[in-house]
Amino acid sequence: MKRKFIIDTDTASDDAVAILMALRHPDIDVLAVTVVSGNMHVRDGSRNARYTVELCGAQTPVYVGCDRPLLREPVHAYWYHGPDGMGGMNYAEPGLQAQKARAVDALVELARAHANEVTLVTLGPLTNIAAALARAPEMAEQISRCVVMGGAANVVGNVTPAAEYNIWCDPEAARIVFRSGMNLEMVGWEVGRGDAALTDADIAAVYALNTPYAEFAMDCNAHAVELAKHWQGDPGMTLHDPTAMAIAIDPGISKRSGHYRVDVELRGELTRGMTVVDERHTVGTQAGFTDEWGVRERNALVHHALDAPRWKELLMECLK
Ligand code: BDR
Ligand code: CA
């Protein structure tokens, strides 16, 4: 039997590759794609998600969700992902329409209908998920596993020295999700750096697959690769959402992980959106300590690093 996934995404170039991986994987059944404001306005994210679904020949329903963070002003990343979010490729308008129902309602209903069966993979700010939890707190128990692409586990961030974009963008939503009791896994942006980035040789090997999927995955991320050369970006093609998807599909791809208590900084003068990972379990070891949320338990499995050859192999398999 196939595993059921729901993908929540602010669909731009690397999100699209992650969606494609799940749609193309023989063991995964994607029940829905829900779109949130983040990299793109939801209008553009919805178009990019629908284009990706159509490219895969799938009929997966795409739902449009929250068009701004819970409290903050939206900050998009067109400068990074290109004016259309797809590296300026200007793909044709998809024929597939977005569902009339809203993403938050779909999340609540699907979690209820498929209780204890669904892996939720989040690739954008956590606004839709926080809103769904506010509507139906029981969703925290109904989702069997939630893999979050977001955060930086006590390492430098990508939008500030302290924070990664998805969490920084809507820190209040992220805090709600991290405190919800859901079975969470965090894949920070650092997991997609270093040897996880695609080298020129890797990119050439993907193109050599000579499939529409391979071409699409590389083309729409080429803008970000170029940009990184002229900005303080990492070398190669860093695919953060696909690395999280790889761990969601095959947990064995994670090379190093730990179960910690994780919380999100909201008010820090320099540290808004920082994911504070209690790697030494300091809070839990203070005798009698109970914080404002009354919980000392570890609330997330944090992935620190992946097996780069295995992740790249999985990517290639999905793009064949
Ligand atoms: C995250 O931010 C976005 O630009 C990517 O799609 C990814 O979800 C990485 O920080
Ligand atoms: Ca994303």
Image: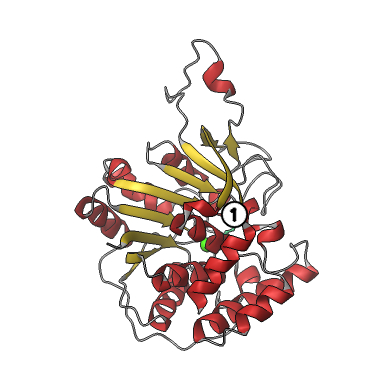
Ligand number 1: quarter of image: bottom right
Q: Residue at x 43, y 24 (%)?
A: 295
Closest to the observer, 188 or 27 = 27
Determine if residue 256 is in view. Answer: yes
Image x and y of residue 241, in percent: 54, 61
Asked whether, in this view, residue 95 is left or right of residue 242, the answer is left
Q: Which residue is mark 1?
A: 165
Image x and y of residue 312, in percent: 59, 66
Q: Residue at x 57, y 25 (%)?
A: 281
Task: Name the image quarter holding residue 67.
Answer: bottom left
Residue at the left extreme, as displayed: 113
Determine if residue 87 is in view. Answer: no
Task: Name the image quarter holding residue 137.
Answer: top left
Image x and y of residue 93, in percent: 43, 86
Mark 1 residue crowding within 10 angstroms, few (<14) / some (14–19) / many (20+): many
Q: Residue at x 54, y 42 (%)?
A: 302
Asked whether, in this view, residue 195 is left or right of residue 185, the answer is right
Task: Name the image quarter holding residue 56.
Answer: bottom left
> Residue 172, relative to residue 27: is it above or below?
above
Residue at the top extreme, as displayed: 288
Quadrant where the N terminus lies? bottom left
Secondary structure type for disc 1: helix
Image x and y of residue 161, in percent: 71, 46
> Residue 283, relative to residue 75: is it above or below?
above
Closest to the observer, 204 or 284 = 204
Q: How is the structure coloured here?
A: secondary structure
Q: Please, what is the three-letter code of the amino acid marked with disc 1?
A: Tyr
Closest to the observer, 44 or 202 = 202
> Residue 26, relative to residue 174: is it above or below?
below
Ligand 1 closer than 8 Å to label 1 CB: yes
